[in-house]
Image (cartoon, helix red, strand yellow):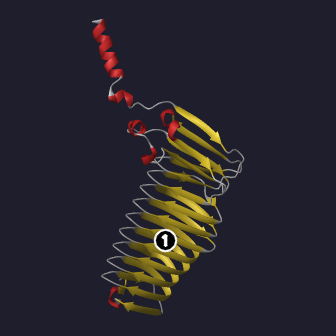
């Protein structure tokens, strides 16, 4: 009977399910009181930004992932985190081991303490949260893969944002100059922006870009089956180019200039005193 119990225990210990158990978490603190200006996160990292004049980067990660960890800071102060080298640089044994480790959820968290943020880059299934409002100068945000930026309030001079893949983002923006946003793939971007000098928006493929607030002038482009929804974003002047089956909804008070092709459409609110349309002008209509 004892022999049978030992056999059962050994089989459970070395079964595939047992091998998938996560290891202990380790903690690594770096870059205390050094310049930190942003983050670049890949894989499934969960990133949290906390506003603080005393900078540091606090990493929590499953111990089994430590040999694959990439954790560094570049000359501009951007902290990068990720796991795994390039797949084609791994040996077959390393590929098998890495695949085994990644079969279940593992702790991958980075907490950044910093006063301002100028750069955010997310890829894979990484996710960034921030409970504080942040400011920056010329702010750059890039999302790809299935990454997400669920809520961020940020202010500065300019913001340039690029979203691709199936990424999602929701931002509240206060800028003194230009807002430039590009969305492609099946991304969903929600923006609330006030006092924008110039909004330069583009959406292609199946992307959806929604914007609320107000601004002075805009230059918007859409293509494929993308949508730009700006019914609640009040502009004085707007130039729009639409292609494919894409659509743009806008709210314009002074001047609307459009160029449309394919079966795309432009719908507008407000009462612009000047409307100039070329190509598919019949697709430009007021919203009832």
Q: Residue at x 52, y 63 (%)?
A: 171
The answer to whether residue 271 is visible is: no
| Left or right of 109, for residue 226 | left
**What SS does tag 1 mark?**
strand
Query: Is 268 placed above or below 57 here?
Result: below
Query: Is 190 placed above or below 38 here?
Result: below
Check disc 1: other Cα within 10 Å, few if <14, some if 14-19, many if 20+: some
Q: Residue at x 35, y 23 (%)?
A: 14
Q: Which residue is mark 1?
A: 212
Query: Is 64 placed above or below 119 here?
Result: above
Instruction: Give the number of marks.
Output: 1
| Left or right of 135, for residue 221 | left
| Left or right of 100, for residue 157 | right
| Left or right of 72, for residue 267 | left
Q: Nearer the viewer, residue 227 or 286?
A: 227
The answer to whether residue 95 is visible is: yes
Q: Residue at x 55, y 72 (%)?
A: 179
Location of the N terminus by quadrant is top left
Give residue 219's position: percent from left, percent from top: 50, 80
Q: Nearer the viewer, residue 71 or 128?
A: 71
Location of the C terminus by quadrant is bottom left
Give residue 98's position: percent from left, percent from top: 42, 38
Give residue 27's position: percent from left, percent from top: 58, 36
Give residue 188's position: percent from left, percent from top: 41, 63
Q: Residue at x 58, y 68 (%)?
A: 159
For the view shown, which residue lies furthest in the top direction? 1
């Amino acid at each position: 009977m004892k022999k049978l119990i030992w056999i059962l225990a050994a089989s459970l210990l070395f079964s595939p399910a047992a091998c998938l158990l996560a290891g202990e978490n380790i903690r690594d603190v770096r870059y205390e009181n050094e310049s930190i200006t942003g983050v670049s996160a890949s894989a499934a990292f969960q990133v949290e930004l906390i506003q603080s004049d005393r900078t540091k980067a606090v990493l929590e990660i499953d111990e089994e992932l430590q040999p694959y960890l990439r954790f560094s800071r570049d000359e501009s102060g951007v902290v990068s985190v990720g796991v795994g080298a390039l797949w084609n640089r791994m040996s077959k044994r390393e590929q098998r081991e890495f695949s085994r480790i990644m079969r279940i959820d593992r702790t991958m968290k980075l907490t950044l303490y910093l006063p301002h943020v100028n750069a955010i880059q997310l890829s894979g299934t990484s996710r960034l949260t921030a409970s504080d409002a942040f400011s920056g100068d010329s702010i750059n945000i890039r999302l790809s893969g299935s990454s997400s930026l669920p809520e961020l309030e940020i202010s500065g001079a300019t913001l340039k944002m690029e979203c691709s893949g199936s990424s999602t983002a929701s931002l509240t923006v206060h800028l003194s100059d230009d807002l430039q946003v590009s969305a492609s793939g099946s991304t969903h971007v929600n923006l609330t922006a006030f006092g924008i000098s110039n909004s330069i928006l583009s959406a292609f493929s199946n992307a959806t870009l929604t914007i609320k607030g107000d601004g002075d002038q805009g230059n918007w482009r859409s293509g494929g089956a993308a949508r730009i929804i700006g019914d609640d974003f009040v502009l004085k002047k707007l130039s729009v180019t639409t292609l494919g089956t894409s659509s743009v909804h806008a709210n314009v008070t002074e001047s609307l200039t459009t160029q449309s092709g394919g079966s795309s459409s432009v719908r507008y609110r407000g009462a612009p005193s000047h409307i100039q349309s070329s190509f598919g002008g019949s697709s430009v209509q007021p919203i009832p």
